[in-house]
Image (spheres, grey):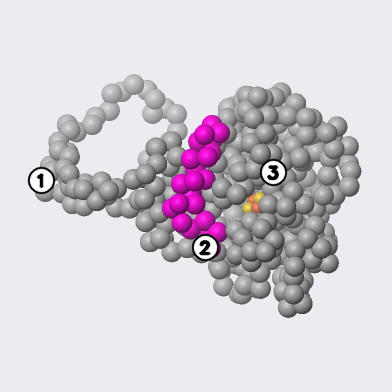
Amino acid sequence: MRKHGQKIEEPISCHNNRLYRDEEGTPSTLPFIDNVEELSKFIYLDKRTKKAIEQVSKFYPFTIPKFYLNLIEKDNPSCPIRRQAIPSPHEIMESGEIDPLHEKEISFTPSFIKRYPGRGVFLVSSQCAMYCRFCNRRRFVGKGWEPKLFWEETLEYLEKDDEIKEVILSGGDPLMLLPEELDYILSRLRAIRRIKTIRISTRIPVVYPEGLTSEHLKAIKRSAPLWFVIHINHPKEVSPEFVKTIRSLRKMGSIIISQTVLLRNVNDCPHILLNLFERLVHLGIKPYYLFQLDEVRGAMHFKVRLKKGIEIMKILRRNASGLAIPQYVVDITGGFGKVPVDYPYIKGKEGDLVRIESPSGLTGTYQDNGKRSKCLKCGFCKSVISG
Ligand code: SF4
C-alpha cells in the first residue's frame, strides 16, 4: 500500500478544466456558473451573501450547471436545490474531518481505494458538473488534482490484484470524462476477465443531463452491462430531462440503482423521501442506499440525527413497497466500513420465542427453533470470503 504523493486538501489553486460537449462530443461553451457575479444574475444575492460565497469558495469551489440552477425556486431561500448547490457560510466551520473515511490510508495507488475484499473504487476524475455542498471527497474534488496521471498505475494494479472482481468508477464524476476517455477506461477494465462487475457512480443525469452525449452512450453500450448508481436526493431533481437520460442509459443495457444522502433541511422528511423513492421505482430505478452524512469538514450543518433517520425508515417500511426502501447505512468515521442502521424491530427473546415489533407498532413472535446449520462440504468455501 502506498500513500498519495500529492497533497489534495489545500485551498484551491486552480480551477477545474471541465469541458462542455455538444451532441458530437465537441468542446463547446461552458453551461456552468462558477463565480458570484454570474450567479447573482440568476438569483438574488445580497452583499453579505455574496461575500460569504466568495469566502467559502476559496476553500471549496462551487460550480452549478445552468440546467440545475433553473431547478431552483428563485424566491425561496429554503429551496432544497439551492441548499445543495450554493455555498453557505456554515461551510467554513472547522468541525468534521478532511477525509472522514480515511480513504488515503487504504489507497493502493493514488487513484484506487480498496476497503473491502473483492472490490474497490477507481477515482477516474476529480471533476463534477456540480460541487455538492456536502461532498465527502471535497478534499480534492474540483481542486485541480488530476487522477488521469494515475490511470495507468491503477489499471496495471488491477491487472495484478487477483482478488478484485468489481470496480466502482467514481471521483469526481466519471461521466465528466470525454467519451473516448470513458471508453478507454471501460475497455481496459473489460479486458481483465476477472473483473465481472463495473459500477459507475454519477450525478450527471440529475444535475447536467445534457453532459451525457450520444458518444458516451455508445461507449456505455460497448461495455454493457454496466451498473449505474445515480446520486439523487430530492423529488424536485426528477426532471423530464433526468427521465429521458435514464431511458437512454437503460437502452444501452445499463442496470440502474440510486443512492441518496440524508440531508438536514433538504430531504429529512419521510414524505419527501417516500415521494422520491416511489418516483424512482416507477422509472425502474431501485433505491439502493440512503446514506447518513459522513462527518466531513464543512458539511456538518447538513447532519441529521440518527434517531430521525431511523424514524424515517420506520415510516417508509410502513408505507412503501419493499422496492422503494433503500438500505439506511452509516459509514463509520475513521474508515471502519459501512453498516446498516435501522429501527430495532427485535424486542427480546424468551427461550426460542423472539418478540418482534412490526413497523406499525404491533408486536408478534417468531419461533426461533431451526436446527443448527452445518457445513455441507460443497466446496464453495474455496473462494475466499472473510468470516
Ligand atoms: S457529485 Fe459526488 S463527488 Fe461530485 S461533488 Fe457531488 S457528492 Fe461530491
Outermost top residue: 378
Mark linked to residue 204: 3
- Helix, strand or loop status at disc 2: loop
- Provide the residue designation for mark 2: 264
- Provide the residue designation for mark 1: 351
Q: What residue lies at 48% left-to-right and 49% top-to-bottom?
A: 273
**Left or right of 320: which side holds 298?**
right
The amino acid type found where label 2 is placed reads: Arg
Q: What residue lies at 79% left-to-right and 30% top-to-bottom?
A: 215
Nearest the eye: 103 or 3: 103
Nearest the eye: 374 or 182: 182
Q: Which of marks 1 and 3 is in front?
A: 3
- Above-or-below relation of 75 to 270: below
Q: Distance between the residues labelled 1 and 2?
A: 42 Å
- Above-or-below relation of 321 to 46: above
Outermost front residue: 75
